[in-house]
Image (spheres, grey):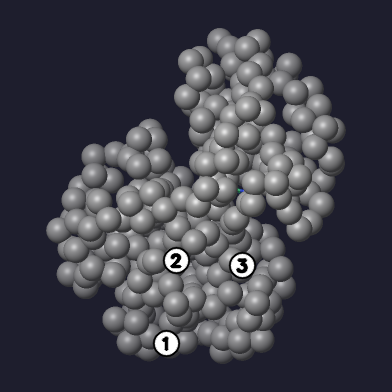
Amino acid sequence: MNTNIQELEPVLETPSGVVIIPHKNPDGDAMGASLAMYHYLKLLGHNATVISPNEYPDFLKWMPGNDEVVKFETKRKTAKRLIDQAELIFTLDFNALGRVEDMKPVLEKSKATFVMIDHHEQPEDYATYIYSDPQMGSTCEMIYHFIDSMGHRNKIGRDIATCLYTGIMTDTGSFRFPSTTSLTHRVIADLIDRGARNSDIHNAVYDTNGLSRLHLLGCALKNLVLLEEFNTVYITLSRNELEQYGFRKGDTEGFVNYGLSLNKVRFSVIFIEDTQEDFIKISLRSTGDFSVNEFAREHFNGGGHINAAGGRSDLPMEKTVARFTGLLGDYKAALTS
Ligand code: 5GP
Ligand code: MN
């Protein structure tokens, strides 16, 4: 763990303009952490705003505070003004300013003091106050510990509890990934006691699919290729396929995990063509010691965690897949021994 976050305590005593930023294409953990922090800072009397770099899936839009989120992509002027005026900027659930893409130059110009709370490997050094712990299963669990360390656990009411529960649930694969600890479960128990309605939250996130998601899942599973020799699976989804089944943002979330459900498979990757720009978004998952963080960093301009990472390719699909399969020989021992 790398932290000096306790030093933030006196800083938070003076009300100020605060902006809270999740990474681009925010997931449940990034939005849950940002909205929980928003509710907490408002309780302390700060003038806080969440600015998301871009749009996020509908299955996250029921969270308390969602309607107050400013999207940089569509409200650039408002977002820039808020960032210019901010004294404090929280960057949550990411470790490198590049993860906000187009927003990066705006953040670099800001004179605000930066705070990073995050659980990805190898954090960059842009924040004055940092709480980085790659052992943690989610940034939301860290926000809980952060609020607790400020002596404010009793300020966690239903709204904060609901947002934190959501992010812990989504980033731990509903409490099944190895990063889930007994402490995670203690935090979850306390969040339920403080008003998080666990069953309703699972339902709101996982049981509100549109038909497009299920049709795309069918397509993805049909496209799945098992490379037995490497205990590896890859899946492709082309722009044509996404359009054919009526793709909506968030529809492909979690598809990559199906690869790992096959017996013996240790490495699963999905390649998804972007529907707007010419690049391929890559999601990588593994079990055990095989680090997809290293693999994504080295070969696909990405990163993340040991068992869950992302990256991108600017080559067309066929060439991207050929490049990927060509790399596997070098990893055969790690994937099979
Ligand atoms: P996902 O595959 O669900 O998009 O992302 C898996 C994990 O890797 C998440 O923790 C996410 O924040 C991280 N991640 C996804 N894409 C990238 C990327 O392009 N660069 C880096 N450094 N991390 C990524
Ligand atoms: Mn996360």
Q: Eyeballing the image, is 291 above or below 229?
A: below
Q: Position of residue 79 (x, y in %)?
A: 60, 82
Secondary structure, mark 3, is loop
Q: Eyeballing the image, is 273 above or below 335?
A: below
Residue carrying label 1: 47
Q: Position of residue 333 (x, y in %)?
A: 63, 13
Disc 3 to disc 2, C-alpha distance: 13 Å
Determine which of the numbered discs, if any, sits on residue 280 in the image. none
Please tell me which residue is depicted at 69% across the width and 63% down the height of the picture: 101
Disc 1 CB within 8 Å of nearest ligand 2 atom = no
Mark 3 vs mark 2: in front:
2
- Compare marks 1 and 3 and give the one earlier in the sequence: 1
Residue carrying label 2: 61
Q: Eyeballing the image, is 65 above or below 251?
A: below
Mark 1 neighbour density, 10 Å: few (under 14) some (14–19) many (20 or more): some
Q: Position of residue 30 (x, y in %)?
A: 47, 59
Mark 2 neighbour density, 10 Å: few (under 14) some (14–19) many (20 or more): some
Q: In which image quadrant can residue 80 be found?
A: bottom right
- Compare marks 3 and 2 and give the one earlier in the sequence: 3
Disc 1 to disc 3, C-alpha distance: 22 Å
Secondary structure, mark 1, is strand
- Compare marks 1 and 2 and give the one earlier in the sequence: 1
Quarter of the image with the C terminus in it:
top right
Residue carrying label 3: 54
Please tell me which residue is depicted at 67% across the width and 60% down the height of the picture: 98
Please tell me which residue is depicted at 27% across the width and 63% down the height of the picture: 161
| Amino acid type for the residue under numbered disc 1 | Asn
| Amino acid type for the residue under numbered disc 3 | Asn
Disc 1 to disc 2, C-alpha distance: 22 Å
Q: Eyeballing the image, is 321 above or below 44?
A: above
